[in-house]
Image (cartoon, rainbow, N blue to C red):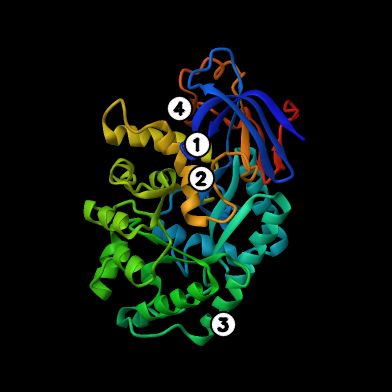
Amino acid sequence: MPEIRDCIVLHGPDLAPHRCTRFAWEHDTITAIDLAGPCLRIDNGALVVIPGLTNGHTHMGDSFLPDGATGLTLEEGFFRPHGYKYRELAKLTREAHLPHITAHLAYMARTGTVRHLDFREQGAYGAALLREASELTGVQSVILGQFDGVPFTAEELRANQADLPAANRAELDAMLSIADGFSESTMNDLTDGAWREIREVTERCGKLRAIHCLENAAYRDTSLAVTGRGDLVRAIEVYDAHLIVHLTVATSDEIALLVRSGKTGVINPRANANLGLPLPPVAALLHAGAKLLLGTDNGLLNSPSMLAELDFTYKIAKSQFANALDPDPAAILKLATSNVRGVLGGDVYGWLETGLPADFVVLDFNRRHLRASRHAVASVLTRVTPDDVLATYRQGRALWRDPRFLS
């Protein structure tokens, strides 16, 4: 039975740091966490075991275009049908594409990520391609498929009367036979009738529903002009989305609506910043008690490193709270760990306890820049680099293991 002795474990859903005399796992399950006393401060180094990280929002399909959106607007880079990424995706063969996706999933494992929630373009074909990459690397891909083409004309969208075309209904069925759920770029891409039909189909199949909302003010304004309701209102009332991504320009009323709905938001601060968009209201969302995850978004914009995203988000939140006390570092780390439980359920927990799946990361706090940390959780957010990740495990399988790590 593999084990780690004399380490520090961020334990339970609150990620409380404790000394641990023995952390052990067998097959896919944690079999022992022998806790000693609480331990926030490290004086002479330690191995630190944290839950495996979840990347709450990715587009791994465009990982073959690193920094390809440089100098492009949101509309130029990412909007269908003529956005840069869609033009480039259409040129790519499966043989050329798959190695890019697997390489970026492997990089996620290298940086402590065990799963990601992906908005996957290219219909059933795109979902199958990502599923193959997931199986090759062991990183869990929660796949949210998107139609390969645009179902409606601009005139049909403005009229907001048409139902989902039969061809797209068949495409939806094919996609959901592979994917874990459905996504589209914005609420403005489909009619209300189509959204209701997709809601019914996904409910019958027990699949997730996700959408981008409020990434900029035009999302809200277009929805208001066509339907009389903002895109967040429609996402909740018409589509009943489980995941609402971005919330970059959410107002206090919209944040209150999100909280009342019980839906989970996903923020992507580095991507928003890279596009010159406003930063999401992290402090306001946390203060209101919103359910939140954290993601890296498009491969055109960012590396899929949750370590980088956690660092950036923590500092944004502190700036927005405008005091030295808020937020608690654990509140930010939960965006990539224990908060995922409320979305995925099943055998996904996002925290470490005996009897739970062995999804964990081993960090080397024996290194000089970490060995005297005064706050272990804050140091995970702000000082850990990919070089400090000794091992990443999902369900007991080593997705990444540094030669320095012997368990």
Q: Which mark is residue 308?
A: 1
Residue 223 spot, x, y in % from top left:
29, 69
Name the foreground residue: 124 vs 75. 124
Instruction: Name the residue at 28% across, 63% down.
Output: 220
3 or 2: tag closer to the N-terminus = 3
Nearer the observer, disc 3 or disc 2?
A: 3
**Quarter holding residue 318:** top left
Q: Quadrant of residue 281?
A: top left
Would you place residue 239 above or below residue 155 in this image?
above
The residue that disc 4 covers is: 378
Rounded to the nearest whole Å, what is the CA distance between mark 2 and mark 1?
9 Å
User: What element does badge 2 sit on?
Assistant: loop
Q: Amino acid at mark 4?
A: Ala
Say which element carries label 1.
helix
Q: Residue at x 61, y 71 (%)?
A: 124
Pointer 2 with pointer 1, Cβ within 8 A: yes
